[in-house]
Image: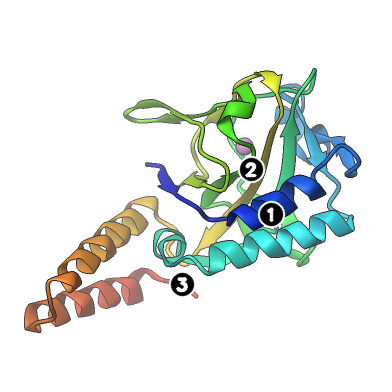
Amino acid sequence: MHLHLKNILTPDELQTARRLLGSDAPWIDGRSSAGGQAVSKKQNEQLSQDSGNARQLQAMVLAAVNRDPLFFSAALPKKIFNPLFNRYSGDANFYGPHIDGAVLHSKATSQWVRSDISCTVFLSDPGDYDGGELLIQQVQGEQSVKLAAGDLVLYPGSTLHQVSPVTRGTRLASFFWIESMVRSTEQRQLLFDMDMALLQLRRQGEGPALVQLTGSYHNLLRMWADT
Ligand code: NI
């Protein structure tokens, strides 16, 4: 399953992101963050993590996801890897099929994060580049994801995925991983579906059945969550 969350970043935040990710930003070879197997398949650029630009952008993206109740419900985050930023353009324009590393060490927080969920926040307007689709291999077939600037996609970290070549323009994005309080994708999905249904029911008024169902949601979360 993958989940699309709209307008995670405001237009002002997007403008700030594009300014801080301009041509004078400290871009480095994206292969510096790829594991051995991924190196030969990865051809993009990444913002140096040790830069003021990166720190400012990381704080902005983290604040944005943390204020979104849908993000919390879908991810049930325990730890969030400090957001990273990449650029696909010119000759550095693709990332072949791969599965992300299972545990990642965050320099910013000096901690290990298990990648239960992978996230991408699209920062460029889709009309500004050709190609650059995030292709996610799932049981129901390959999903092609190319979202509006400011939107986020969230998908299981265990899935094979790739970024198709950008043949015109520049694709800027932020990407990061989440270690969830609920490790199982199936359990997390069930809780999210239930939470969304409860949200709809609540609009029709509270009643004893809704109180019971809300309690059942929390009791399932209590059973499965690891904080
Ligand atoms: Ni990846």
What is the CA distance from the residue labelled 1 to the residue labelled 3? 23 Å
**Residue at (60, 35) in percent of width and height:** 125
Check whether the beta carbons of the residues at disc 3 and disc 2 lie within 8 A of each other.
no
**Residue at (16, 74) in percent of width and height:** 213
Check whether the beta carbons of the residues at disc 1 and disc 3 lie within 8 A of each other.
no
* Residue at the disc numbered 2: 123
What is the CA distance from the residue labelled 2 to the residue labelled 1? 13 Å
* Residue at the disc numbered 1: 83
Amino acid under disc 1: Pro
Question: Residue 166 placed where, x, y %?
Answer: 66, 21
Q: First in sequence, mark 1 or 3: give its number.
A: 1
Quadrant in the picture for the N terminus: top left
Q: First in sequence, mark 2 or 1: give its number.
A: 1
Task: Tell me: is circle 2 under 8 Å from ligand 1.
Answer: no
Question: Circle 3 sits in a helix, a strand or a loop, which is it?
Answer: loop
Question: Circle 1 sits in a helix, a strand or a loop, which is it?
Answer: loop
Instruction: Say which mark, if any, is on residue 226.
Output: 3
Amino acid under disc 3: Asp
| Left or right: 186, with 227 as reference point | left
